[in-house]
Image: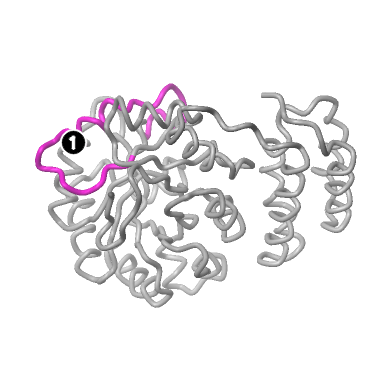
Amino acid sequence: MVKIGNIELPEFPLLLAPMEDVSDPPFRALCKEQGADVVYTEFISSEGLIRDAAKSTKKLDIYTKERPVGIQIFGSNLKSMLGAVDIVEKTKPDIIDINYGCPVKKVVCKGAGAGILKDIPLMVSLTKELVKRTSLPVTVKTRLGWDEKTIQIVDVAERLQDVGIKAISIHGRTRAQMYKGDADWTKIAEIKNNQRMHIPVFGNGDVNSPERAKEMKDRYGLDGAMIGRASIGNPWFFNQVKHFLKTGNKKQEPSIYERAEMAKRHLKMAVDWKGEILGVLETRRHYGNYFKGIANFKEIKSRILNEKNPFEIYKELDWIKQNFSEELVSL
């Protein structure tokens, strides 16, 4: 059993990574249905929260069916981060997660996200104060280091544990790598093998197949996997991984009917939550994977991607269900 504070999780839990414009309530709900053990919100700006910015406060929406759910915040200013923690705590999530890993320039240039990897003492002192501020378990998501020359993640993880975090998730790349190259899980395993570490250590980056998840568990000995890009347009991924870990056999890919139905549910929930314009716009990024591997699908996919009226998209998805209902996706 794996525990984040007092939250009990199964052996080798699967976590939905916080992803901007992806890990919203509709998508989190679908991933939860398919076996995600913990889900995280999109990352939320501490500055936006303390200024009551609508875009930031909207991301605080969480629902009972998602639990356990973590709200992730980012920032580098102590006063702003403490204020954000106070605001987040009122929404009663199960976990508060701190983003020390986002590599995007507009975040990093302000010393937040992966930018704080340039100032480890600040990272540790900031975390210490945030842990003291709340009764909720605080977790951290970060990267190996700023670049290859500054990797000291084993020491960093230990220092963060010493100031009170209850779990750490590590993306196996540096900020300099962004998302290029291969994730290095050996460095994450070094953290897990540090005898002083007693909190869960979760791996992230390149968990793109059930076999890779099993490798993370068996070869690298990590406590669980945080899954990001592999789940986009593919919430079944969590169920597929769990099935493979349990049986050693790969689960059959969902049929085109199942994919169209899931896409329709996803869009409906997104429209209900965000409204028609944003709901349609932000669901588009998922369609490529929802319908990956379907022969002669380019024209239909183009119509769906270019359509702005959700009701017309529902019709297209229903047409797909009726005309491709017995076919399986070939990957």
Q: Name the outermost residue toward the bottom.
A: 90
Q: Could you tell me the amino acid type at mark 1?
A: Val
Q: How many marks?
A: 1
Give the image's coloring scheme. Answer: one colour
Between 317 and 87, which is closer to the camera in this rendering? Answer: 317
Between 11 and 77, which is closer to the camera in this rendering? Answer: 11
Q: Residue under label 1, please give it.
A: 154
Counting from the top left corner in percent of width and height, residue 68 is at 41, 61
Between 63 and 1, which is closer to the camera in this rendering? Answer: 1
Q: Which residues are magenta?
A: 175-202
Q: Name the outermost residue toward the left.
A: 196
Q: Is residue 266 magenta?
A: no
Left or right of 264 in this view: 36: left
Q: What residue do we see at 23% from left, 45% from top?
A: 119
Q: Residues within 10 Å of mark 1 (few under 14, many from 20)?
A: some
- Residue 163 figure quarter: bottom left
Badge 1 element = helix
Q: What residue do we see at 79% from left, 31% from top?
A: 327
Quarter of the image with the C terminus in it: top right
Left or right of 269 in this view: 212: left
Q: What residue do we see at 77% from left, 28% from top?
A: 294
